[in-house]
Amino acid sequence: MTQIPPGALAPDLALIDTLAQEAIADLPAPFRAAALQVRLRVEDFAPEAILAQMDIDDPFELTGLYEGIPLTEKSSDDPPMQPDVIWLFRRPILDEWLDRGDVTLQDLVTHVLVHELAHHFGWSDDDIARIDPWWE
């Protein structure tokens, strides 16, 4: 598990990406392979166009986003128009992490990632609970 180095100012985009990649690597095998097919993007905040489309005024309200067609809705007859993408937004994640003060950054990044993967896989809350003990 990646540790935040002593003396580090704030976790950067690369660290959030590393924590997300570790979370994917820790998924059960049947989900790991499919999760690796989803493009992962880590940015400080959601782009303005996404915030506007979702009618979100405060960019700190969005920690992650799934863009794509859930596997439960995909058809082999429909050619993919663009790759599925999971966005993680560093600043809102860090803000929540600091506000909570009771979870590790790894746990929070994993939780946000699993929530977004749930949209991709079409998981129920029970499915999520089996993968992410956060819900217990």
Image (cartoon, rainbow, N blue to C red):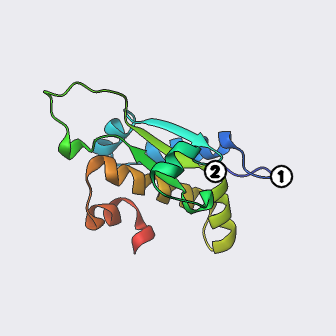
In the image, farthest residue toward the top = 79
Q: The disc labelled 1 sits on which kind of residue?
A: Leu
**Image spot of residue 50 (x, y percent):** 50, 46
In the image, farthest residue toward the right = 7
Residue 53: numbered disc: none
Determine whether 100 is above or below 18 in the image: below
Q: Give the residue drawn at x 86%, y 53%.
A: 7
Q: Which badge, 1 or 2, is on the more N-terminal residue? A: 1
Q: CA distance from mark 1 to mark 2?
A: 14 Å
Tell me if 34 is positioned left or right of 90 in this view.
left
Tell me if 135 is positioned left or right of 44 in this view.
left
**Image spot of residue 5 (x, y percent):** 78, 49
Q: Give the residue drawn at x 72%, y 50%.
A: 11
Which corner quadrant of the image does residue 80 belong to? top left
- Marks 1,2: beta carbons within 8 A: no
Which quarter of the image is occupied by the C terminus? bottom left
> 44 or 109: which is nearer to us?
44
Q: The disc labelled 2 sits on which kind of residue?
A: Arg
Q: Secondary structure at mark 2?
A: helix
User: Circle 2 is placed at which residue position?
Assistant: 90
Label 2: how many residues lie within 10 Å, few (<14), some (14-19) or many (20+)? many
Determine whether 38 is above or below 128 in the image: above
User: Circle 1 is placed at which residue position?
Assistant: 9
**Image spot of residue 100 (x, y percent):** 63, 73
**Image spot of residue 70 (x, y percent):** 27, 45
Q: Which mark lies nearer to you, 1 or 2?
A: 2
